[in-house]
Structure formats: structure tokens, C-alpha cells
Amino acid sequence: MRPLKKIIDLAALRHNWQVLQAQAPQARMMAVVKANAYGHDALSVAQALADVAPCYAVACSEEAVALRAAGLRQAIVLLEGIFSPEEIALCAEQDLQPVIHHQRQLDWLAAAQTPLKAWLKIDSGMHRLGFAAAESEALFAQALCMPYVDWQGVVSHFACADSEDLAHAEGQLAQLQHLQLPDTWQRSYANSAAIFRLPAAQGEWLRAGIMLYGLSPFEDSCGADFGLQAVMTLQTEILATHYLSQGESAGYAQGFIAPSEGYLATIAIGYGDGWARRIESGKVPVLIEGRRYYLVGLVTMDMALVWLGTENYPAGTAVELFGKQLAAEEVAAAAETIPYTLSTMLTPRVRLEVRHG
């Protein structure tokens, strides 16, 4: 069996839930499990939180139906709403709550007159999806003319809550605070970053995304800085080592030239597994027996190279690419990407190992 695997620590996941919930104990929290729970395996994550999470948030109905098929009965919010009028019946049947962000979706609801629960999305400054805050009075009036829809409240999303400069986020929040919501409607504005940086945005419902998985959305920080624990560890093994003389090359296009005599390890991971190909040689760290080494040369479909220098390790030695001992945030920065991509880009070829604590 190929040694590359992602190890999912569900005890760490539950710890992170408690840390996030403690930031706003008065609010309820949605577990955001879209994109296969940011690559962490949505079913494992959802089941591990089933006794504490009152609601899950996904991108689309396909992700929601998979949770329902696993027997999960909690509320499920569809963050991208519905993509066709045919999905309205599915939402009603499966008890899904779409986020309505466009006039055509309102028109579909009006035509169907199907009883279901839903949310409205207000564009307060992200400018991706949602109705303009300035149009909210007319929007709410239109929504209240649909008695067959049980409106849960309003959703919005911050563009810059993870920035040092919160001026834009505070401007968004000011717009949201001026909304005249119907009495029973609830607010879901705060994503992971806003839970920590904008307590005034917490409202009735938080959306716990990246930080639920122990990763920081903030530049120059890692999850541990906020008391979080890494949920995913990506681990592989050394397949072989070769001794190189100074000046000898290795890999496609002679992508690595040995700076001195020493050992070069080949490890089992490549772009066929979702690992980034275009990373700078000698910049991205890995951890072997507690020591840092660096990926060198060109990442190939199935393999990558690690320069060991004067050290040597036998085939089968474990290599941590990120996780418990090597922060994903550090690896992502070295690879000139963000930690979100490290976990979500992994392909099904990466074996899943779930640990319950």
C-alpha cells in the first residue's frame, strides 16, 4: 500500500469546536463542511460533531444529500443556494436551507410556492453573491410576501476580516447593523476570522470554517497561536536515498544540482496527489525524525525529492509534509499559497486514516 496518507484527528476537531464556541458562548455555530470539509472528509467530521453541532453548512445540495444519506438530521445550510428551480423540491424533501442570493432564485420560490426554510444573503461589500444592503427594505418586503417560505434570517460574508486593517470589515458591519430585520430573523455574519477579530459581528449564528480544522486565516500566524490543534497531518515515507557527489544532478531537467556531496531522498508524493508542482527548490520544508529538510528539484506526478545533506535515513522512514509538528501555515507560505489549498487540493489517491483520539 502506498504510504502517502492524510491522518485526521477527530479529538483535535472537537477541541477546536470548543475553542471557537468559547469566543461567543451566546451564539450557535454552523460547522462548515463544504469541499469535503476542506479536504478533511466531510462524513467523518460531521459525525464527530453530531452531538454538538446544531447545523452544517455546505456549498451545494450534492454535499448536503451525502450528509443526509449518512443519517445526519441536523439543519444543513446551502451557502451557494439553489442552481435551478428543480432543486426546490429536493430542499423541501431533504430539509435543506438554501441561501437565496439572486432575484431569479426568489422568482423560482414564488413560482413553486413550496414550503421550505431559507436564508437571504446581503452583499455588504464582498461583491460576489447577495442583494445590495441598500435594497434590503424592498427585498424583505418581497420575501415576507412568501408565507410558504420559513425565512431563517440573513447571511453575509466579510472580505477582509482576516486583515490587519479592519476598516473594510468594519464598514461592512456598519451596513449590516443598519438592516431592519423582521423580528424573528437571525443573523449569520461571522466567519472564522470575524469570530476572533469582529466580536460585534457574531450575531445568533457563527460559521466555523478554516479554524475548525486548526488552521489560521490570518497572515503570519498559525492555529496554535489561537489555542487550536491541527486536525490533518499529511504523512508519507522515504522510498529510497541516493548518494550524490557535488555537482551531480537529479530529477527532470536536472532540476536539482547537489551543492555538496550528500544524500538525496525520494518520497512518495507528487502533483498526482494534489501537491503543488511549481514550488521553489529548497524553500518548502518537510520534517523527518524531528528535523527540517527541504524539497528540491521538480515535483513529479508521483514523487518528490528531499535534500538530506550529510544525514541518511532508511527507506520507510516517515516524512511529515504538514500537520502536528510542521504547521500547514508555514508550509503554505513557503509554497506561496494559503493553507486552505494544502488540504482541499489533495486528490482521492491520498489514503484517509481517521483517528478518534
Image: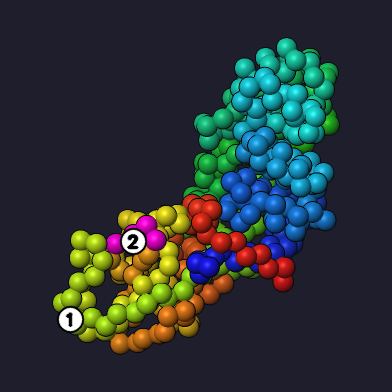
Q: Residues within 10 Å of mark 2 (few under 14, many from 20)?
A: many
**Height in image: 221 above or below 171?**
below
The residue most toward the top is 111
User: Residue, x 68% and y 68% (percent of image)?
Assistant: 355
**Height in image: 335 above or below 165?**
below
* Residue 63 position within the rendered picture, expressed as x and y whole percent measured from the top left: 66, 41
> What residue is shown with label 1?
246
**Residue sitting nearer the eye, 293 or 24:** 293
Contact check, label 1 and label 2, Cβ < 8 Å: no
**Height in image: 31 above or below 351?**
above
Magenta stretch holds residue 301: yes
The range drawn in magenta is: 298-302
> What residue is shown with label 2?
299
Q: Which secondary structure, mark 1?
A: loop
* Residue 314 position within the rendered picture, expressed as x and y whole percent measured from the top left: 42, 84
Q: Which secondary structure, mark 2?
A: loop
**Residue sitting nearer the eye, 299 or 77:** 299
